[in-house]
Image (spheres, grey):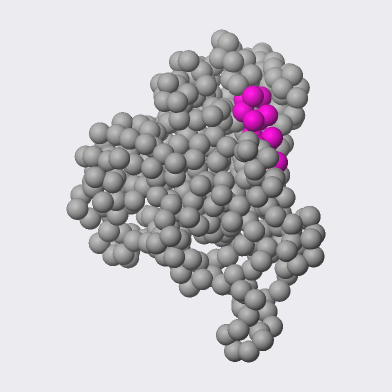
């Protein structure tokens, strides 16, 4: 069965009533027939029928032995870090999501968990950073916002040989583009806020794991710490996931058109998109991913903050906002928004220049999106002309 069909039909109708849409079981507790004798549910932190449908769906989509839904992507990140104990080490991708970096450095460092950051596009760097204490190898591919690609299968082999677990934050790819567990990873997590829910209307996190043993560990952590996704938000995420395949394919096709358009703009310095032949990891992306993703970023030849801020305030369809992955296109300026807290030197070293603009491409008609960008480029040219005349 093709995946688009499978997603829809793996979400079964309600066994009790036959309702085609999953009911929202907005209840904290469940009546028991006798102490400990129940219908499989006793308290909604431990298990809830609406959340369970979502958890089974992400497990199926990622080909895992278990799935779990959390209150946010960062709550999912937090649950995975809790697999570690004091003295353990993590090797992580150097341009990791800022919130994950903050958890590592500001929360878990003081509990004796050490993280080594490295450029994971070269597997040799992983080998150099592994010690007998390494517990997790933490990957993101593609990365945010420069879209570097890491070889999940090769690194999973290295991890296995060294007794470490591989965690992949699969938010930017979604399960439609790549399935890390099939490539040898042990744990995959998502900010479902982005592509999976897909409509910029809910904050949610998901985890899928390869083995029953890991499923038991994550289940324990989820119940013990309680950062579960509520029934209503689970329902919104289930609704979103049913069109994941449709949306992501369209968004990726649109992004390819936009990347080609940007690659021909003479005022730009770099266009980051794994689908472009000139992208340093293009061959790996072609092998590892079904499509090239729907985020594109670029820098101007004139590398100033003003250049980028003028641009992002002059688009019309691309709305200026944090986040990505939804059906409506967004743009953002990482240097002053998502990466504001990163020291300038570290930020520039990661390729996030002052003039870098990130686009999250939505499902609009691609000709309208290209026209919107073209108009913004024209407008900022006239802003600069006026500035020259005024000076
Ligand atoms: C947004 C994001 C997160 C955090 O998810 P929230 O749902 O905002 O808590 C984690 N990882 C990546 C790659 C993200 O883009």
Closer to the camera, 3 or 365? 3
The spot of residue 354 in percent (x, y) is 49, 30
Q: Quadrant of residue 325?
A: top right
Name of the residue lying farthest toward the left? 132
Point 45% across, 30% down: residue: 288
Name of the residue lying farthest toward the bottom? 34
Name of the residue lying farthest toward the front? 1
Can see residue 42?
yes
Point 75% across, 67% down: residue: 16
- Residue range highlighted in magenta: 243-255
In the displayed structure, 27 sits above or below 259; it is below
Closer to the camera, 330 or 53? 53
Point 54% across, 59% down: residue: 68
Can see residue 355?
no
In the displayed structure, 19 sits above or below 224; it is above
Q: Is residue 391 left or right of residue 16?
A: left
Q: Is residue 251 magenta?
A: yes
Instruction: Assign the N terminus to one quadrant of the image.
Output: top right
Q: In which quarter of the image is residue 316?
A: top right
Point 30% across, 40% down: residue: 157
The spot of residue 24 in percent (x, y) is 74, 64
Q: Is residue 120 magenta?
A: no
Overall secondary structure of the magenta stretch? helix
The spot of residue 214 in percent (x, y) is 41, 59
Closer to the camera, 192 or 270? 192
The spot of residue 291 in percent (x, y) is 56, 28
């Amino acid at each position: 069965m093709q995946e688009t069909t499978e997603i829809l039909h793996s979400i079964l109708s309600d066994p009790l009533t036959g309702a085609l849409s999953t009911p929202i079981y907005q209840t904290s507790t469940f009546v028991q027939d006798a102490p400990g004798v129940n219908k499989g549910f006793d308290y909604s932190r431990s298990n809830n029928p609406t959340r369970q449908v979502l958890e089974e769906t992400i497990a199926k989509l990622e080909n895992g032995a278990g799935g779990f839904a959390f209150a946010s992507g960062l709550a999912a990140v937090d649950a995975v870090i809790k697999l570690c104990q004091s003295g353990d080490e993590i090797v992580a991708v150097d341009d990791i999501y800022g919130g994950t970096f903050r958890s590592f450095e500001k929360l878990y460092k003081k509990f004796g968990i050490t993280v080594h950051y490295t450029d994971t596009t070269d597997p040799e760097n992983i080998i150099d950073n592994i010690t007998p204490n390494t517990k997790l190898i933490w990957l993101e591919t593609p990365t945010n916002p420069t879209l570097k690609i890491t070889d999940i299968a090769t690194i999973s082999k290295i991890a296995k040989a060294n007794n470490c677990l591989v965690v992949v934050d699969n938010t930017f790819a979604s399960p439609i583009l790549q399935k890390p567990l099939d490539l040898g990873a042990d744990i995959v997590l998502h900010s479902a806020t982005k592509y999976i829910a897909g409509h910029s209307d809910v904050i949610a996190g998901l985890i899928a794991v390869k083995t029953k043993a890991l499923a038991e560990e994550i289940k324990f952590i989820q119940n013990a710490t309680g950062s579960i996704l509520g029934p209503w938000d689970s329902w919104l995420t289930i609704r979103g996931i049913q069109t994941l395949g449709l949306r992501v394919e369209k968004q990726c096709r649109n992004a390819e058109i936009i990347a080609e358009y940007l690659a021909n703009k003479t005022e730009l310095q770099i266009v980051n998109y794994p689908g472009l032949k000139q992208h340093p990891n293009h061959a790996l992306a072609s092998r590892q991913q079904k499509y090239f993703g729907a985020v594109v970023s670029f820098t101007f030849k004139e590398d100033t903050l003003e250049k980028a801020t003028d641009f992002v305030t002059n688009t019309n369809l691309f709305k200026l906002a944090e986040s990505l992955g939804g059906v409506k296109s967004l743009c953002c300026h990482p240097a002053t928004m998502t990466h504001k807290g990163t020291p300038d030197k570290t930020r520039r070293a990661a390729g996030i220049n002052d003039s870098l603009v990130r686009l999250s491409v939505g499902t609009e008609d691609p000709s309208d999106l290209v026209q919107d960008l073209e108009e913004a480029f024209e407008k900022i040219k006239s802003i600069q002309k006026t500035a020259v005349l005024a000076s």
